[in-house]
Image (spheres, rainbow, N blue to C red):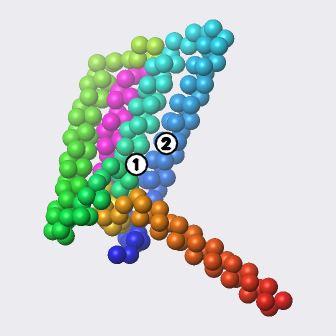
Amino acid sequence: MERKRKETPFNKPFDIIEKVELAFGGATLAILFVIVLLQIVSRLLNIKLTWSEEATRFFFLWMMWISVGTGFNHCESSRVTVFVNMMPKVVQKICHALYYIASGALFLVMVVVGWQNAMQQLAMGEMGSAFRVPMWLVGIAVPIGAAIGILGLVNTGLTESWRLTTTAEQLEADALVEKAKAEFAEENTQKEGGDEQ
């Protein structure tokens, strides 16, 4: 089976969405890193940053939920490919269908329940105790991460369904083969250029 991304009209929108996800996830990680550094420095200087511990938790939650959803973009989520690949083809197809159905159902429940919880926090005017931000801004990370997961499932199903049957080792081996081919082609080009001189 050829392991290449199918070209569909959805590729460009999915690529844009993925770039936004990665940028947002990277930004939350960078902010989290800065806050933790501030905590370390403040303890060394004996300064109290009462908001930093709570802020760390909030940004960690955002980073985690964005990452959970983003992991489904290229089927990089947890799955048991080796065991499934040992099964008969019919069972493999059933397992692949179950992957999409179970993951999609879980994410759908997370969107609905997460949204309800965030809206309840908004209605109650709940605020963080030390890092005075509205708690719905933290709670909304759950449905957003789940929605990203649903988009990732659709992306994989439409463009890269072969990833369900491919182990991480196979993908690494393919990458090494492609790298070796590129290096070999570059060496041949350089030799041909040297022979002509």
Q: Is residue 148 visible?
A: no
Mark 2, Cα crowd under 10 Å, few <14 / some 14-19 / many 20+, is some
Q: Nearer the viewer, residue 61 or 89?
A: 89
**In the rendered image, the vertical position of residue 131 relative to residue 6, given as above or below:** above
Q: Nearer the viewer, residue 121 or 171?
A: 171
Position above or below: 169 against 109: below
Amino acid beneath label 1: Thr
Q: Which residue shows up at 80% across the image and 91% down it? A: 196
Taking the view exactly as shown, the residue that stands out farthest to the right is 197
> How would you rate the neighbour count of disc 1 (Cα within 10 Å): few for under 14, some for 14-19, many for 20 or more?
many
Seen at 43% across and 26% down, the residue is 58
Pointer 1: what residue? 70
Q: Point out the image quarter for the N terminus.
A: bottom left
As for residue 82 lying within the magenta part, the answer is: no
Residue 20 in view in this figure: yes
Numbered circles on residues, count: 2
Residue 130 locus on image (x, y percent): 46, 13
The type of residue carrying mark 2 is Phe
Question: Which dot, 1 or 2, sits closer to the camera?
Answer: 1
Mark 1 / mark 2, whichever is N-terminal: 2
Residue named by callout 2:
24
Q: Are marks 1 and 2 in contact (CB under 8 Å)?
A: no
x%, y% of residue 104? 23, 50
In the image, residue 148 lies in the stretch drawn in magenta: yes
